[in-house]
Image: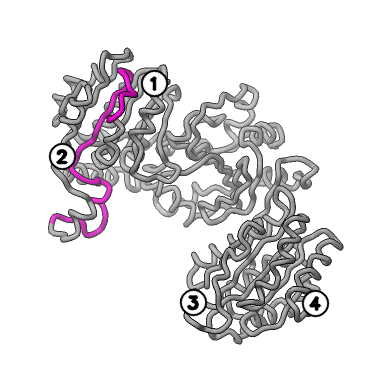
């Protein structure tokens, strides 16, 4: 029988799954459920050592004799500090060592309770990774716990070997041993490139070829990568290629971009039919909430993430393989290793998404964004400020020769305009900036400098507040908190734009937009930069958006 603490069960299951065999167990009460569980697993060879100072170095010896990581488990408080010298030795000698410390609940740290001190990150820079496990009270807690343990264990041999620290807070009751078996814990494996020096990747390619429903999702990438025709021919119909505008031109196949609206329109049966078996991801952040929700609720059998840094990025909660490699090198490597003919799965996604119409709405912030996108000269650069502008631009087709830029690293409101102006300062293209009123006024000091010229075209969507916040539950006109959450205002950009030397136009209807859109989208640099401020009715905007999504639901 094992401890009933799910964090401990995950820890034991993953130590076993990752092939850890040798464990040093130090005495104590807080770590008793960990010790009891580990000592009752036949796969582990356990050693009892009382003095933690000696135990740490003993574990180093175990690791040196065999090469694989050894583990050491201690109780809370000063016991952990006594392992510090061994941790330092393991770090500088590059020895894989897993330090497991039991801990009191966070609420009792610093409250004069016995054997308590701040244990997370106690070893500072002398470990390759330090993780503090959550106490598991939900499925999300258990997923998080599983991910952290996987990250710690595989880090012991990542870019050289070394120690890691896993801190395990344990609440009362701690002496309850009712679990009869270990869980089937999800194991994350890292490949450092596809070469025989790291590990045999033939098994990985065999898994790739065992699936017919393959999908690739590309996050934000600020580049254009031109695949050679031979790779395009080999790869294009092997995956359903889902990309957002922020991905730019970084795939060797047909780009499916309106998947957000398409997923919203699907019935439960259609979602199951369209679910991938294998998901491969590369690039940075993905904006679509619909896509995240869909794959978290309908997970593929496998998720591989390809990145040059080899970090774990478990966006959809089902990651099992990390491949540390340039993603384009990876795709070109597997292009001629994929067996068999193209499958129908990519065509299923392409055809379904092609059946979803673009929004055709009367004058609104969405229709104005669509009008601009349809008129973008080629080539050009399009800067999307954040939030609503990014999501609504995704509803419209953008030519592949348009560069897309956006601050979606942390996705904050600040700096969108400043970044765009910095980009445009040395750009040969006409630079279009679509920005909401809150983002513009927050970063209006970007226009304080003189570092801009006539290749700047700014479209401010002014609906007198944070539009996306109006869609939150309870944000009707009677809500007491509405003005604080949505930051409602009556401010215009006119005075500031004209003072800074911009050509300025105010637009409140479709006729006024027609009067200025040709000048705004000309492919020639103007004598002055231009700013058009589009005023829309936020209530009407929200209604039109809901009507559009209602029209495509369960098509």
Task: Name the residue that disc number 1 marks.
Answer: 380
First along the sequence among labels 1 and 4: 4
Q: Are marks 4 and 2 in contact (CB under 8 Å)?
A: no
Q: Which mark is residue 491?
A: 2
* In front: label 1 or label 4: 4
- Is residue 151 visible from the viewing direction of this image? no
Q: Which residues are magenta?
A: 448-477
Q: Residue 485 sits in which quadrant?
A: bottom left
> Is-magenta flag for residue 228?
no
Instruction: Using the image as rendered, state which of residue 478 and residue 204 is in the foreground.
Output: 478
Task: Name the residue that disc number 3 marks.
Answer: 110
Secondary element at image label 1:
strand
First along the sequence among labels 3 and 4: 4
Q: Could you give the CA–CA distance between mark 2 and mark 3, rounded to whole angstroms? A: 49 Å
Q: How is the image coloured?
A: one colour
- Is residue 184 visible from the viewing direction of this image? yes
**Label 1: few (<14), some or many (≥20) within 10 Å?**
many
* Residue drawn at the location 41% of the way across and 17% of the way down: 428
Q: Residue 541 sits in which quadrant?
A: top left
First along the sequence among labels 3 and 1: 3
Residue 519 at x, y percent in the picture: 23, 16
Q: Residue 178 sits in which quadrant?
A: bottom right
């Amino acid at each position: 029988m094992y401890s009933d603490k799910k964090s401990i069960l995950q820890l034991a299951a993953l130590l076993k799954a990752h092939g850890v065999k040798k464990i040093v167990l130090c005495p104590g009460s807080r770590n008793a459920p960990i010790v009891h569980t580990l000592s009752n697993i036949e796969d582990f060879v356990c050693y009892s050592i009382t003095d933690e100072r000696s135990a740490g170095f003993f574990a180093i010896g175990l690791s040196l004799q065999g090469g694989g990581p050894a583990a050491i488990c201690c109780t809370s408080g000063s016991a952990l500090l006594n392992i510090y010298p061994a941790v330092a030795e393991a770090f500088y000698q590059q020895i894989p060592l897993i330090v497991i410390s039991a801990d009191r609940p966070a609420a009792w740290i610093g409250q004069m309770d016995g054997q308590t001190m701040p244990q997370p990150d106690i070893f500072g820079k002398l470990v390759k990774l330090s993780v503090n496990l959550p106490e598991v009270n939900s499925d999300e807690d258990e997923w998080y716990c599983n991910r952290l343990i996987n990250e710690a264990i595989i880090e012991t041999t990542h870019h050289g070997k070394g120690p890691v620290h896993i801190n395990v807070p344990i609440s009362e009751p701690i002496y309850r041993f009712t679990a009869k078996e270990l869980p089937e814990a999800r194991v994350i494996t890292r490949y450092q490139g596809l070469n025989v020096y790291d590990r045999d990747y033939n098994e990985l390619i065999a898994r790739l070829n065992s699936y017919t429903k393959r999908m690739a999702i590309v996050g934000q990438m600020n580049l254009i990568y031109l695949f050679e025709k031979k790779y395009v021919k080999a790869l294009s119909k092997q995956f359903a290629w889902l990309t957002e505008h922020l991905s730019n031109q970084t795939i060797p196949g047909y780009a499916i971009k309106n998947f957000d609206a398409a997923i919203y329109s699907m019935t439960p049966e259609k979602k199951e039919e369209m679910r991938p078996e294998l998901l491969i991801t590369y690039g940075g952040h993905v904006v679509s909430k619909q896509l995240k929700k869909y794959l978290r609720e309908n997970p593929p059998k496998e998720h591989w993430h390809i990145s040059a840094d080899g970090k774990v990025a478990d966006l959809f909660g089902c990651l099992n393989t990390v491949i540390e490699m340039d993603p384009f090198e990876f795709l070109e490597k597997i292009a001629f290793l994929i067996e068999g003919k193209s499958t129908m799965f990519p065509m299923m996604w392409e055809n379904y998404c092609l059946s979803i119409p673009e929004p055709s709405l009367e004058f609104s912030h969405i229709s104005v964004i669509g009008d601009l996108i349809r008129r973008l000269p080629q080539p050009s650069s399009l800067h999307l400020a954040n939030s609503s502008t990014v999501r609504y631009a995704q509803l419209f087709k953008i030519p592949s020769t348009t560069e897309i830029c956006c601050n979606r690293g942390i996705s904050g409101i600040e700096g969108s305009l400043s970044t765009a102006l910095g980009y445009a300062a040395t750009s040969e293209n006409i630079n279009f900036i679509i920005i909401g009123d809150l983002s513009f006024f927050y970063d209006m000091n970007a226009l304080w400098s003189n570092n801009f010229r006539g290749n700047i075209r700014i479209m401010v969507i002014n609906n007198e507040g944070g539009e996306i916040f109006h869609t939150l539950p309870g944000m009707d006109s009677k809500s007491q908190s509405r003005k604080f959450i949505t930051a409602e205002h009556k401010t215009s950009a006119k005075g500031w734009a004209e003072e800074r030397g911009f050509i300025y136009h105010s637009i409140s209807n479709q006729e006024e937009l027609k009067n200025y859109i040709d000048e705004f989208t000309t492919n020639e640099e103007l004598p002055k930069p231009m700013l058009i401020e589009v005023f829309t009715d936020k209530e009407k905007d929200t209604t039109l958006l809901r009507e559009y999504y209602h029209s495509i639901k369960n098509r």
